[in-house]
Image (tube, rainbow, N blue to C red):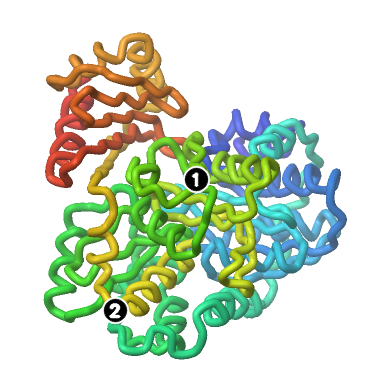
Amino acid sequence: MAATKMHNANMLQDVMQQSGVGFGTSGARGLVTAMTDDVCAAYTQAFIQTLKQSFNFKQVAVAIDLRPSSPKIANACANMLKQLGLEVIFCGAIPTPALALFAQTSQIPGIMVTGSHIPFDRNGLKFYRPDGEISKADESAMLAAELQAFAGVSSALPAENSAPRNAYMQRYKDLLGEGALAGQKLAVYQHSSVGRDLLPQLFTELGAEVICLARSDTFVPIDTEAVSAEDMQKGLDWASEYQVDAIISTDGDGDRPLMSDEKGQWLRGDIVGLLTAQALNITHLAVPVSCNTAIEASGAFKHVMRTRIGSPYVIAGMETLQKNGASSVAGFEANGGFLLGSSVPAYPTLAPLPTRDAVLPVVCLLAQAKRQNQPLSALVAVLPQRYTASDRLQNFATKKSKALIESWSSSAQTMLQALNLDETVRDVDTTDGLRVTCISGHIIHLRPSGNAPELRCYVESDSATLSQALVNKVLKQLAYL
């Protein structure tokens, strides 16, 4: 019955309403059971119709992550592309930024089948124009696209093209040079990341000794903004056992880094981003409002623009900075995904890649630590000591999250009282969710997830232990509301 409805839907917005598959902070997401062939074909068709208004192309690149549902979804997209008269370049299972780089270099669109870090019962689609990620304006145009009937799946995916994977690796070998990581001992936490084989190969070719750990045939939904207590302990145990310089991993689709220091302490994503921007001599930054205030306190940048959470907003911020004359521009998110908005004078081979990337920040920090002959912990230690922690309530209805935040936005002190916090409001920021800075210097930030029924909590203070304790306390109180 659902499939018949999808065939009869006139516009993508009808498909979205009927299926529940909708746009989040970056791309479309939904339950695997809702992402039928017809739904995936409808999103693909709307994407192509929108791009045809501005670009000429005959090919489209398609890639997948390692979720069990991804190949079937990709095949539906590919069959719709063929129905529209387009050639499909199937890139196989590669990181999202590798697909984005190939699409940008080839000046063709790209579709990445991935649910990123969310549980495997969900999946999604990320869309790339020939010049980068689609914008929120593109999403609106897609929703209004009129659809033709999908003829159905009639053929298998094409043979895998290895060029996108190879070009992505070459980007970083050209950046660092042969033997750049020689003498370093690295562990790769493989789990089910789509980059789990690419990373060990890249690090080995750059000269490092590599140990591979915890490969999983079952999908592991690692969220780099909310590292589990189990993974925190794994980091400590592995560092002690293997005596490595760092432990490296990513989320499911390889666009968000998870990186530890030599002690096995996982580095916060915004701290990784800050150090990367410093290493690249970036002058102008666009970062979400949820990122650590050590960015401004470091004094390393001429201008820092704060945006809503989500790569489309960071990209829009970077574009604004460039229009205003900035020549060295980048962005990153609290999850560690690094977006390079411009060329970098000190590194002429490094082309802009305005989408989240996990490899650039990792190799930059490893190379910086080697150049300075210091452990990663020493790079972090010289930064202003502000500590962030975050976590989320899962299976928390988005409607309920929005209602709570709306009611507290007019009286943030009421929120603090409801959360049983002995704090007094100093400033309120409603750029994205509700971010309250207290007179004590503590920051409490609540925001509904853009792609899952979750309520996220971010806390910042001058103590790592206190920040985590505050996150735990806030989420415990929210669970009772």
Indicate whether 175 appears above or below 95.
below
Q: Nearer the viewer, mark 1 or mark 2?
A: 2
- Residue at image point 27% right, 73% down: 246
In the drawing, does residue 242 fall left or right of residue 142? Answer: left
Q: Position of residue 24 (x, y in %)?
A: 52, 38
10 Å crowding of disc 1: few (<14), some (14-19), many (20+)? few
Q: Where does label 2 land, which residue?
A: 373
| Quadrant showing the N terminus | top right
| Quadrant showing the C terminus | top left
SS for dot 2: loop
Quick one: 19 or 118, which is closer to the camera? 118
Spatial separation of the CA atoms under disc 1 and disc 2: 51 Å
The answer to whether residue 38 is seen in the rendering is no
Looking at the image, tell me whether mark 1 or mark 2 is earlier in sequence order.
Answer: 1
10 Å crowding of disc 2: few (<14), some (14-19), many (20+)? few
Q: Position of residue 391 (x, y in %)?
A: 27, 41
Which amino acid does the dot numbered 1 rest on?
Thr
- Residue at image point 67% right, 30% down: 13
Looking at the image, how many numbered discs can be counted on the residues?
A: 2
In the drawing, does residue 161 fall left or right of residue 65? Answer: right
Quick one: 474 or 92, which is closer to the camera? 474
Which amino acid does the dot numbered 2 rest on?
Asn
In the drawing, does residue 242 fall left or right of residue 206? Answer: left
Q: Where does label 1 land, which residue?
A: 33
> For residue 321, what is the image quadrant?
top right
Indicate whether 231 appears above or below 448.
below
